[in-house]
Amino acid sequence: MKALAGKVALITGGASGIGRATALLFAREGARVAIVDLDEAGGEDVVRAVEEVGGWASFVLCNVTRADSCQRAVRFTVQELGGLDVLVNNVGIVRRATVVETREQEWDRVMAVNVGSVFLFSKYAVPIMAEAGGGVILNMASGWGLVGGQRAASYCASKGAVVNLTRAMALDHGPQNIRVNCICPGDTDTGMLRDEARQLGQPNGDFLSEAAQRPLGRIGRPEEIAQAALYLASDAASFVTGAVLVVDGGGLAG
């Protein structure tokens, strides 16, 4: 039996990185997947990849900072795929800067994407899940949502907010049989990680070597974070809510 057979999942930021890996894994495990992103070409490419593994997916163009766009994406998912069982709030951006270096519009953008999108998609998904008898919400935070990091003030603040928003939502919506959990990845091999190197003016090789300095001696792969998402989305985690799962190769262990 596939772990997500008959389920419908909506994944924000699904066109690349962890979102793409999660979409492909969920589809292989039987879910119908809505891929939400601003990157239309990347999103359609994921749809084709899902279809190649025998799955079913649909791309939804969405500006995750706009309430009307998020609401349309949720409605489209329900109408096109037949419901909404799992919401993965995965979309995120990073700005590597101190509070002094960060412009106000940059701060607002990071908070709108990283925290505001979690609020908006959850706001529109929860009533649908509650009416259907329950569901699962997974919020993608970061190890830097639990500890601070240098020159990443807005990112750390946003991911810390996601961690505690997860706990608050778990308390509010547990009685509706909606489980809400959070994943905190460590440095993972994505385009966003390489963009951090660019922002800091560091060569990719040097930056990635520094990121690999953790007990397991390497950075993570998107597929490894997707496996954590699959566990939390599945019935294997039926008694897990309000949890913060760190997947970072031991980076926060010491």
Image: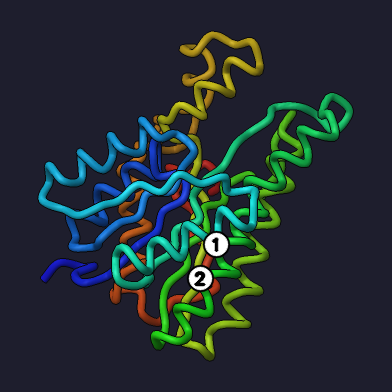
Residue 131 in the image: state x and y as whole percent: 45, 87
* Label 1 crowd (10 A; few <14 / some 14-19 / many >=20): some
| Disc 2 to disc 1, C-alpha distance | 9 Å
Whether the residues at callouts 2 and 1 have beta carbons within 8 Å, the answer is no
The answer to whether 78 appears left or right of 153 in the picture is left
Q: Amino acid at mark 1?
A: Gln
Image: 43 above or below 213:
below
Using the rendered image of the protein, determine whether residue 63 is visible from the camera's viewpoint.
yes
The residue that label 1 is drawn on is 71
| Viewer-nearest of discs 2 and 1 | 1
The answer to whether 245 appears left or right of 225 in the picture is right
Image: 156 above or below 174:
above
The answer to whether 25 appears left or right of 222 in the picture is left
Depth check: give the residue in front, 187 or 155: 155
Hey, which residue is sitting farthest bottom in the picture? 175
Q: Amino acid at mark 2?
A: Ala
Q: Residue at x 20, y 54 (%)?
A: 56
Using the rendered image of the protein, determine whether residue 254 is visible from the camera's viewpoint.
no
